[in-house]
Amino acid sequence: MTLIKIQTPDDWHLHFRDGDMLNETVPATARCFKRAIVMPNLVPPVTNAKMVEEYRQRILDARPDNSDFEPLMTLYLTNETTCEDIVKAKQVGTVAAKLYPAGATTNSDAAVKELDALFPIFDEMQKQGMLLLIHGEVTDNHIDIFDREKEFIARNLTRIVAAFPGLKIVFEHITTKDAVDFVVAANENVAATITPQHLLLNRNDLLVGGIRPHNYCLPVLKRNIHQKALREIVATGNKKFFLGTDSAPHEKDQKESACGCAGCYSAWSAIELYTHVFDELGALDKLEGFASHYGADFYGLPRNEGTITLVKEDWTIPEQIILPNGKPIVPFFAGQNCTWKLIE
Ligand code: NCD
Ligand code: ZN
């Protein structure tokens, strides 16, 4: 029996949603992760300290009995966000604020339309020691969807990093070689999260042999040279790159639609699929750093005390899961083989 034991990991980017759905998503993540950075893109979005505290309580209430899972809360930035909002959010323990360019992704309509108007807010965040988490895509109609991350780096990220060298910035769910190169070259306050889908798949897995809506997420899967760059960087054990599943549930009929939602629900298989990838890369010795050390270190939080163990054993990811509202959801990698299994 081949086993791997690592310090208990954290998920540095995910979507729990709200209401009933929390009874599905929170236990799915709490089964193996001690903490998670919870995205604020609810409807309406989580834009102030009061909403942060209320949302945190709803998540805590959805934890399984005896779970010591800890949600790490984030604030949703808009052009109405004030410095006072940042100060108050920080006082209630909010660790980061999320920048969505308006229209970039699911539930981002209320987000940032005028990036430059937010610079005083970034300044306050730098003072408060609050991290800035960025969905790095431009949204202009004329920019090709496959170029939107690269264009965001050139147009926006470079100058944000230059203007706020003391602000810790996480470039979320990166998908391109351009992003890898940017983060490697940037100062030590810039890091990135990487999802299982962007390590496992490229755009052929979205479009060849029929359109596969369950592989559709944003930023969209890119060509294989980009997938290769992501795989190569995690295999080196570079501390600037760490685990963020971007687990983002949408009901089956919202994905299998003429206008399907973006997001892959990976919580029930994410740690297993990352292990599967690191094994394929011959880099299992780098898994623990990626999953359990580098994120905590970057956020300035202690590493977790416990451990989890995975066994090398084939299993098939379920074709569907029934949500608390009775509706089905198709999990990421449904029906496919995973070569590692968590021992619970
Ligand atoms: C996320 C969602 O569904 O909330 N979707 C996705 O494709 N990743 C939003 C996001 O992280 O962009
Ligand atoms: Zn996300």
Image: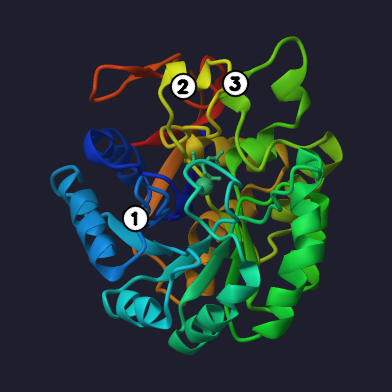
In which image quadrant can residue 179 be found? bottom right
Task: Judge left or right: residue 244 versus residue 9.
Answer: right
The residue sitting at the right extreme is 225
Q: How is the image coloured?
A: rainbow
According to the image, label 2 marks what residue? 254
Q: Residues within 10 Å of mark 2 (few under 14, many from 20)?
A: some
**Does ligand 1 reach within 8 Å of label 2's beta carbon?**
no
The residue positioned 53% from the left and 34% from the top of the image is: 263
| Circle 1: residue type | Lys
Residue 81: image quadrant is bottom left
Residue located at (47% from left, 44% from top): 107
Q: Give the percent coordinates (x, y) of residue 86.
A: 39, 77
Which label is found at residue 103?
A: none
Q: How many marks?
A: 3
Residue closer to the observer: 301 or 282: 301
Identify residue for label 3: 213
* Circle on res. 34: 1
